[in-house]
Image (cartoon, rainbow, N blue to C red):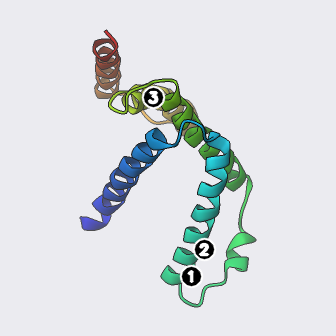
């Protein structure tokens, strides 16, 4: 059971710091310059974690298995992070900016799950989407 929840805890903790850092990025610093340093640190941490968690593994062997998804994910991550920094620079409060985009994303992912992955659109999901929309309405009044 623990193996199912630790990734969620890691995501929540990481997202907490992610949002605090995105909101606290100096106003005069270009977000893309900031992200350049962020990705250099991220690359170093990823490489160190790879070798620490996989003793004797060869990174080169793993890199030969990379496909298009790795490259598109890199582009998507830059979009996510730059969008978050620009969102905060535009004046979104830390308490609502992420909630707005996460609620909208949840609704879009219901459609993508059905169209691309053949996931069922259940009454529960529809009600959940309606609750997200109602929450967005209430938060932005």
- Marks 1 and 2, Cα distance to the nearest angstrom? 6 Å
User: Closest to the observer: 85 or 43?
Assistant: 85
Picture coordinates of residue 58 (x, y %)? 66, 83
| Residue in the image at 38% along x and 53% along y | 11
Disc on res. 51: 1
Picture coordinates of residue 35 (x, y %)? 62, 49
Question: Which mark sits nearer the N-terminus, 2 or 3?
Answer: 2
| Residue in the image at 30% along x and 25% along y | 128
The quarter of the picture where residue 45 lies is bottom right
- Is residue 73 visible in the rendered image? The answer is no
Residue furthest out toward the left: 1
Residue furthest out toward the top: 141
Disc on res. 47: 2
Name the element at disc 2: helix
Residue tagged by mark 3? Answer: 101
Do the residues bearing badges 1 and 3 touch, measured as CB atoms within 8 Å? no
């Amino acid at each position: 059971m623990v193996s199912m929840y630790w990734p969620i805890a890691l995501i929540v903790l990481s997202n907490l710091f992610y949002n605090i850092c995105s909101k606290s990025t100096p106003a005069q610093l270009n977000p893309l310059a900031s992200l350049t340093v962020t990705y250099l640190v991220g690359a170093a941490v990823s490489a160190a974690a790879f070798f620490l968690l996989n003793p004797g593994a060869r990174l080169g062997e793993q890199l030969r298995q990379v496909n298009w998804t790795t490259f598109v994910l890199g582009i998507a991550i830059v979009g996510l992070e730059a969008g978050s920094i620009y969102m905060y620079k535009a004046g979104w409060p830390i308490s609502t900016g992420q909630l707005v985009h996460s609620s909208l994303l949840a609704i879009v992912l219901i459609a993508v799950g059905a169209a691309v992955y053949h996931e069922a659109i259940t009454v529960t999901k529809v009600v959940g989407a309606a609750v997200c929309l109602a929450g967005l309405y209430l938060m932005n009044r």
